[in-house]
């Protein structure tokens, strides 16, 4: 399996559950990340690393998250954060094709056309990865597009508000998700999934991987998600099989069917009582 994303943290937020599950059952999982996210949030104010070293910090954060998820190979490229739509498509295509050739995946996973929340870099990665897989014709791997379940990040923010109030915290809790202020933007324009993966047994690893992205995570509503909450709040992932790429059954379909049949890995906590996109009781 090869995941193709734009910035460190995309892999964990979008499909950390699937990647961790695949790695746990012996699937060779690789990640191509096209930028260092060097223009992203620099962490918590003065205690953050500052823009100059953010590039190196985020590279280390990505390595730690990849270890947590069981990703065996990480290729982190030097394209400028925020500029992917302006880079010549041929350059991105060459990088994506090169990684497909090096890793020989049966399945490629990348953003859908909505770019999780209409992020231009994400949309560019969706377009270029889809174009590369299309051009491979009969030699193409299967292609899946990942989206955030609509409402899932709003549920995280609502959860953060309740936890914050219950703890009597004086400091206002962050309503953003990894630097994105509008939690409702995630998945709002998402095409309907064709495959829903309930990766609840791997949601704790997904949360731990997200925590590795400290510069983005520490000031985020995700900070209020603890490991008992992770299966319910982060365990459901949405995928759409692309019209292009290899046809036939894949590991993604098999894991989705396993989870649906209740034969997947045991759920870690008793609090797992609903999908991530359901409102909390
Ligand atoms: Zn991103």
Image (tube, helix red, strand yellow):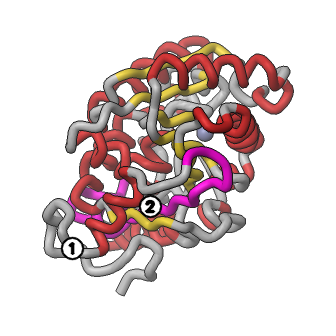
Question: x, y percentage for residue 103?
Answer: 45, 22
Q: On the image, numbered disc 2 is attached to which residue?
A: 237
Q: Is residue 5 visible?
A: no
Q: Which residues are magenta?
A: 223-246
Circle 2 sits in a helix, a strand or a loop, which is it?
A: strand
Q: In the image, what residue occupies the spot 53% across and 20% down?
A: 101
Q: Which residue is at a point 18% across and 68% down the rendered structure image?
A: 263
Mark 2 vs mark 1, foreground winner is 1
Q: Is residue 222 left or right of residue 90?
A: left
Q: Is residue 99 above or below residue 66?
A: above
- Give the answer, above or below, for where 30 lies relative to 50: below
**Residue at the spot of label 1:** 262
Q: Is residue 201 magenta?
A: no
Tell me, yes or no, whether the highlighted magenta stretch contains residue 235.
Answer: yes
Q: Position of residue 25 (x, y in %)?
A: 21, 44
Q: Nearer the viewer, residue 72 or 141?
A: 141
Mark 1 residue element? loop
On screen, 148 above or below 90? below
The residue that appears at 48% across and 23% down in the rendered structure is 58
User: Where does residue 185 sit, x and y in percent of width and height?
Assistant: 67, 62
Residue at image point 74% right, 30% down: 82
Q: Residue furthest front?
A: 138
**Image-quarter location of ligand 1:** top right
Of the 4 image quadrants, the one containing the C terminus is bottom left
Q: Nearer the viewer, residue 280 or 124?
A: 124
Q: Is residue 81 visible?
A: yes
**Is residue 64 toward the left or the right of residue 50 in the image?**
left
Tell me: 278 left or right of 54: left
Number of other residues with Cα within 10 Å of mark 2, as a class: few under 14, some 14 to 19, many 20 or more = many
Name the spot of residue 29 as percent of width and height, x first: 36, 33
Indicate which disc, 2 or 1, sits on the residue closer to the N terminus.
Answer: 2
């Amino acid at each position: 399996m090869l995941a193709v994303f734009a910035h460190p943290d995309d892999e964990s937020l979008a499909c950390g559950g699937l990647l961790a599950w695949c790695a746990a059952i012996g699937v060779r999982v690789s990640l191509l990340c096209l930028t260092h996210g060097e223009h992203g949030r620099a962490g918590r104010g003065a205690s953050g690393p500052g823009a100059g070293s953010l590039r190196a910090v985020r590279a280390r954060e990505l390595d730690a998250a990849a270890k947590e998820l069981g990703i065996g190979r990480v290729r982190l490229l030097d394209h400028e954060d925020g500029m992917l739509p302006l880079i010549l498509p041929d350059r991105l295509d060459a990088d994506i094709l090169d990684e497909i050739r090096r890793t020989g995946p049966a399945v490629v996973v990348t953003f859908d056309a909505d770019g999780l929340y209409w992020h231009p870099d994400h949309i560019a990665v969706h377009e270029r990865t889809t174009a590369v897989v299309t051009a491979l014709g009969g030699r193409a791997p299967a292609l899946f597009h990942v989206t955030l379940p609509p409402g899932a990040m709003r549920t995280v923010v609502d959860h953060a508000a309740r936890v914050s109030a219950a703890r009597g915290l004086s400091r206002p809790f962050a309503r953003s998700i990894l630097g994105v202020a509008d939690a409702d933007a995630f998945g709002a324009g998402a095409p309907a999934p064709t495959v829903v993966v309930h990766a609840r047994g791997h949601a704790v690893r997904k949360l731990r991987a997200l925590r590795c992205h400290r510069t983005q995570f520490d000031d985020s509503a995700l900070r209020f998600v603890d490991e008992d909450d992770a299966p319910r709040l982060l365990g459901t992932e949405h995928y759409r099989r692309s019209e292009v790429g290899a046809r036939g059954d894949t590991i993604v379909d098999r894991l989705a069917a396993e989870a649906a049949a209740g034969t997947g890995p045991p759920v870690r906590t008793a609090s797992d009582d609903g999908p991530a996109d359901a409102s909390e009781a």
